[in-house]
């Protein structure tokens, strides 16, 4: 699995998301509870339509969305956020 550096952790404040471009398309990186995406209780809300998604599975848990969103592995390396270039699963 290849990882792509998308930005620094300082660019993604706690409790917020930022969009970044990967070779495979645009993604949103969520910084939730001092973790990148792997807290099962963590969710994010889409500002466009109000759907709420589980940040680990991508499954919608509330709102009009019925289909899951793709989830990518993320890691922190020396203050830089790196995201897998392909989604999980």
Image (cartoon, rainbow, N blue to C red):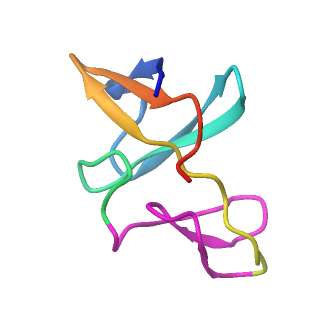
- SS assignment for the magenta stretch, majority: loop
Q: Residue at x 55, y 51 (%)?
A: 71
| Left or right position of 13 against 17 | left
Total numbered badges shown on the rendered structure: 0
Q: Position of residue 11 (x, y in %)?
A: 42, 26
Q: Position of residue 75 (x, y in %)?
A: 32, 33
Q: Is residue 78 magenta?
A: no
The quarter holding residue 7 reads: top left
Question: What's drawn in magenta, residue-wise?
Answer: 40-63
Q: Position of residue 46 (x, y in %)?
A: 66, 61
Q: Residue at x 38, y 67 (%)?
A: 42
The answer to whether 9 is drawn above or below residue 39 in the figure is: above
Q: Residue at x 39, y 37 (%)?
A: 74
Residues 71 and 50: in front is: 71
| Left or right position of 21 against 32 | right
Q: Position of residue 33 (x, y in %)?
A: 26, 56
Q: Is residue 50 magenta?
A: yes
Q: Residue at x 75, y 71 (%)?
A: 67
| Left or right position of 8 against 88 | left
The answer to whether 57 is drawn above or below residue 35 in the figure is: below
Residues 25 and 1: in front is: 1
């Amino acid at each position: 699995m290849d990882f792509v550096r998308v930005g620094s952790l300082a660019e993604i404040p706690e409790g917020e998301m930022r969009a970044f471009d990967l070779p495979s398309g645009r993604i949103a990186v969520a910084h939730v509870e001092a973790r990148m995406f792997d807290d099962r209780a963590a969710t994010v809300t889409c500002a466009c339509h109000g759907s709420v998604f589980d940040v680990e599975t991508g499954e919608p848990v509330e709102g009009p969305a019925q289909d899951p969103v793709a989830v990518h592995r993320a890691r922190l390396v020396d203050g830089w956020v790196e995201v897998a270039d392909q989604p999980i699963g």
